[in-house]
Each structure stands twice: as structure tokens, then as C-alpha cells.
Amino acid sequence: MASNGQRHQGRRDSRRTAAWIVILIIAVFRSTTLYAQAPAVPAATIAANRAEAAPAEVEAQALRVLVGRSAIVDTGASIARVSLTSADIADALVTSPSQLLVNGKMPGTISMFVWDRAGAVRRYEVIVQRDLSRLSEQVKRLFPGEAIEVQSNGRNVVVSGLVSSKDVIEKAVNVAAGYVEKKEEVVSLLQIREDGASNQVLLRVRFAEVSRTAVSELGASYVTSPTGIKNNIVRATTQQFAAPTISDMAWTKANDKFGSDVTGASGKISFSDFLNFFLFNEKYDIGIMIKALQTRGLFQTLAEPNLVAESGKEASFLAGGEFPVPIAQGSGGSVSISVMFKEFGIRLNFTPVVTGNRVHLKVRPEVSALDFSNAVVLNGFRIPALTTRRTETEIELLDGQTFAVAGLLNSSMNSTLQKIPGIGDIPILGKLFQSKQAQKDRTELVVIITPQILARNSTGVTSDLPRMAEPFLPPISEKQSAPLPPPAFTRPPGSVNDTTTAPVPAVRRGPDGKALDPAAAAAALTALSPKARTVVNGDATPKSQDGQASSVARPLTSDEKKALERARKQEDAAKAAEAAQASKQYLADRRKQVADQERLAALSREQARRDGEAARRAAEQAKRQAETDQKRQKVIAEAEARLKAAEARYKAEVAQKDKP
């Protein structure tokens, strides 16, 4: 028994030792509480416990800061860590255990997270905006009476409201641009009020010029016949006007001695101006040509350029052309010719600024034309001169006020007297050997401008439109026209790709020209149409082959006949009215065509008359040029003759001296 007890005691000791070893190992390698015979915990319960143990997310708070300004945030707990989504927009500085200093850098919105010592998180939405208080005050002070509002939208500044003119919009945007880095960051939502003043100006400019010229010429030239008077040929002229000339002179003498009689002579008299009065006496072989002419010239021009521009914007107008001007350019040892084009014609440049009912104008009108009489010929190029009338000024006028901004009055007189010395000084007889030319010129030029502020409801079209010199083809009547051919390819109705549209029924009109009511027309048609007879408790109406019930015809009543006759009369009256209207339109078109043809013929006659005058002037100019050339040739010939005569006398003298 003792041995059995010892064995049981040894077993208990060994079990205790093993249990203590297991407990020691668990305590060393894993700090876990073991529950003996503990029930299993559900997963849902564990998740709920974890959710309760996690800190709850706090709702974000809005924090507004101006650019360049700071704000203090008191969290109410000790701050452990701070995080910002972007440090370019704002930054935060911990100034105390529970306070933050937030600085605004540039417009934008970011998030800021703040953790405290206990692990709680606070979220702030930091909104950084521009300081627009000064801008709002400045806008109200600069634009009184204008409903302008200034708001911030991220980086942009939004300017909105209703203003009186577009000029105010541009100025307000320029003022707001001074508060941002770039002008593109200003968003303008400004609109012009319906009752606001217009900012468009119509400028009417008129160039009126009248130039008058009066020329009087009086003089006389004398000439003998080509054979002379008793072998004497005489020609007397002052050289102021064209005189007859003697050419192709030839004579024969009895012998070669000096002073021998002339046995035969011949020659020709040439005239260069047939407008002179010429008298020649064949009996006495003497003639006289009298130059007595008076000229009256009138030049009148009128140019009226009109131009519309917006207030504060420059507008330009040019009706004319360009002519080439060669320019020599040297490069090294060679010279190249380049061409530059110069403008001419009617030009108008102006800049209006509307201030209430007044218009400030910076205007520069100009009228220029080609002047070939003063042209320059350079290396084969004929470069014309320009006759220019230009003015440039700045004035301020009322709406519709007409003002003459420039004017010119130029009067000139030129008188020339030429005479033969000696005989031309005789009191009465000397008038026959004198020639006088007097010319008077008078030019009047005025430039008139009229600004007109265009209303917002202005049509912008003038009634003084250019009229056509020749009418266009008249439209084709319905009787002479043919209908359009059917389309080449058609689709079945109701298909997916069927894009054809149903024809629109024509509007029927009565004799008075008014459109007939569709409902009234349908009612009248229903009243005129025979109705089907109604069968009560009888057999069914027999069906036709297509299954439709056939209607039973009945005679028309007197009222229906009158209505039908009335409808026919109305249709006949409408047709007659249409025919009369077409006839009137044809007659009006015919009269207009005849008037246009007459106007065209008058214009053609006027153009022919102008062409004739231009040809006559060109002939006169060519004649004067020919006279000038002839005089020059005559002077050259006389000089050559005198030179030959002097040379002959010199040779004769030398020969006389050489004789022994």
C-alpha cells in the first residue's frame, strides 16, 4: 500500500511540474489571457467593438482667409500634428499648444487636418480669397450710377452688373486688372442696359470744291507772202502767241551778182492755230493774224465719305487705288529697282469718343488725285504727281451738329504784256504791235463734318442707295415656267432613311387678299358634300368590293346651291384680282424699264459729251505743244542760219585777204 501511495504522489508531482513549465513558456512567448472553457465570440460582435473603439470623423469646418492676411484657429486641445494639401495656397504655424496661425498666399481652396494628443482628428476647409473691398470701393467711386458688382471665384475676379455703355465695360475691366497678376484673370459679365446710350457714331464728311478760271488773249502778227513785197519778206510777231511761219522758200536770180533782180520765188505759209482770225491780201501780198480769245473754265467736285465707328475705336475708309512708284536700291556695284505702291483717292480716318450728347472727334479726311501734268519720267517710268487736299484736327461737337473744320479761298491773277520795242510804244499805232494775256483763277474749298450718334434701334441703312444703270432680268411668270423634274431616286414612304417632307398646301386667299380660315373652309366643304343616309333598324348598307360602304347621293338644296355659286364667284373674283394685280405689276415694271433705259441713254450722252471735251482739250494741248516745238525748231534754224552766214562772211573775208 505504501508503494502504491508513493507512486500516486510521484505522478501528481510530475503533472504539476509539466503544468508550471507550460505556463512559463506561454507567459514568456505570448502575453495572452487564456480562458478555460470560454464560449466563442461572433465576428460581428468583434467588428462592432472595433468600430466603437475607432475615433469618429469630425465634420469639416470652413475657414476663410484673404490673400496676404492671417487667421488664428483655436482647436481646444493639444496639437500633435498638422497637415495641408497644398502649401502654395496657404500654410499653418503652431503658435501655442492649442492654437494655429493660418496664412493666405494665393486664391484657392485646400484641406487642413489637425491631430491632437488623444488621437482625435479635426478637418478644416481653408478658402483663400482676394481682398476685393478696396476694388469695390474704387469701382463705386469711379463709376457712380453704374450697378457693378465685384466677386471672387478662385483665382479669377468676376465683374458683373448692368452698365450704360461699352466704354464703361472696358474701363471697369482695366481697373479690375490692377488687382490681379494677369488681365486674363478678370472675367467680365457686364451687360449694357437696354436704355443705355449708344456708343456708335456715324461721321458724315463733305469735300466741296469749286475752281473757276478766266483767260483773255489779244495780239496780232503780220506776215508777207512767201514771194515777198518787192523782193522783201517781212514777218512781225511778239512770240507770245502762235504766228504764221514761212517755209520751203526758194528763189532764182538773173545772175550771181550781188543785188541782181529776182526772176522767180516760191514758198509756203504754215498755220498752227486755226482759232485765230487771219486776213491776207493777195494784191498787196500782206496778211495779218489776230489772236482774240476768251476762255472760261469751271471745275467742281464733291466727295461725301461716310463711316461708322465705335466709341474709342479708330475707323478708316479709302475709296481710290494705288499707283506704282519705282525705287532704286543699290547693293554693291549693282542697282536694283523695286516697286512701292502709294495710295490715292478719298480717305477718312477718325476716332470718336461719346460723352453724353457730345462727340469728341480726332478726324483726318483726305482727297487726292493723280496729276499727270506734273509727272516725272525716270528711266522710262512715268510717275504721276498727286493733288492732295488734307486736314487733320481734333474737335468736340454735339450730336448732329455740322461744322466746317477746314476751308480755302485762293484767288490769283497773272497778266503778261509783250511788244515790239520802239514801234510798240507809239500811243495808238503801238497797240497793233503788242500782245497781252491775262489769267484769273479762283478756288474755293470747304470741308464740313457732321457726327451723328446712332440709336440702338437704328436700321443702319440709308435711303440714298446707288441706283442701277441697267435693270436686271425680270422674273419668269408662272405661265412661262415649267415645274421641276421629279427626283431621280425615291424611297418608299415610311422607311427609316426617308428624309422627304410632305408638300405644304398652298394658302388660299379670298378676293380681298386675306387668307381663308382652314376650319371655315372645311365646314363649307362638309356642308356642300352629300351625306350618307342613316338606316335605323334596317338592313346593313351593302358593301362594295373593297369593303367600304357606298354613300347614297341626294340632290342639293337651294341654300347649298347658293353657297356653291357664291364660292365659285369668290374664286372667279380672286382670279380676276390676281390678273389685275399681275397686269399692274407688269406695267410698273415696264415703266421702270423704260425710265432706266432713258436714264442710261442720258448717261451715255453725258459721257460722250465729256469724252468730246476731253478730246478737245487734249487736241488743244497737243497743238500748243506743237507750237512750242515749232518755235524751238525755228529758233534753232535761225541760229543755224546766222551761224552759216557768219561762217560764210568769215571765209569771204579770209579769201579777200589772201588775194594779192
Image: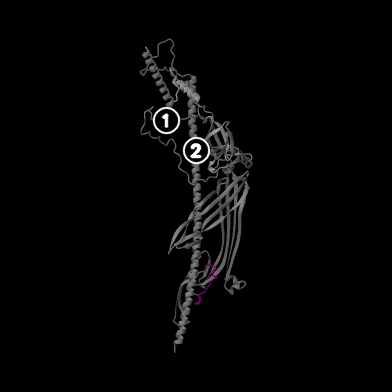
Depth order, front residue of 639/389: 389
Residues 536 and 173: in front is 173
* Residue closer to the observer: 394 or 36: 36
Instruction: Nearest to the eye among marks 2 and 1: give it.
Output: 1
Amino acid found under the numbered disc labelled 1? Thr
Identify residue for label 1.
501
Query: Label 2: which residue?
Result: 585
Residue 643 appears left or right of 443: left
The residue carrying pointer 1 sits among few (fewer than 14), some (14 to 19) or many (20 or more) residues within 10 Å by Cα, namely: few
User: Quick check: can you spot residue 520?
Assistant: no
Q: Residue at x 44, y 24 (%)?
A: 32
> Which of the 4 image quarters holds residue 464?
top right
Task: Report the quarter where the N terminus lies.
Answer: top left
Q: Residue furthest top?
A: 537
Compute the Cα span from label 2 to label 1. Answer: 33 Å
What's the magenta bit mostly, secondary-structure-wise?
Answer: loop
Q: Earlier in the sequence, mark 2 or mark 1?
A: 1
Q: How many marks?
A: 2
270 within the magenta span: no
Q: Position of residue 448 (x, y in %)?
A: 60, 51
Viewer-closest of 128 and 271: 128
Q: Quadrant of the C terminus?
A: bottom left
Specify few, some or many for label 2: CA neighbours under 10 Å numbering under 14, 14-19, or 20 or more: few
Q: Which mark is residue 156?
A: none
Residue 476 appears in the picture as rendered: yes
Q: Amino acid at mark 2?
A: Gln
In x, y percent, where is residue 57? 52, 28
Indicate the secondary structure of the residue bearing disc 1: loop
User: What percent of the width, then of the height, locates residue 89?
Assistant: 53, 39
Query: Which percent across, then down, holds residue 523?
Result: 49, 22
Specify the segment rendered in magenta: 229-242
Q: Is residue 460 above or below residue 508?
A: below
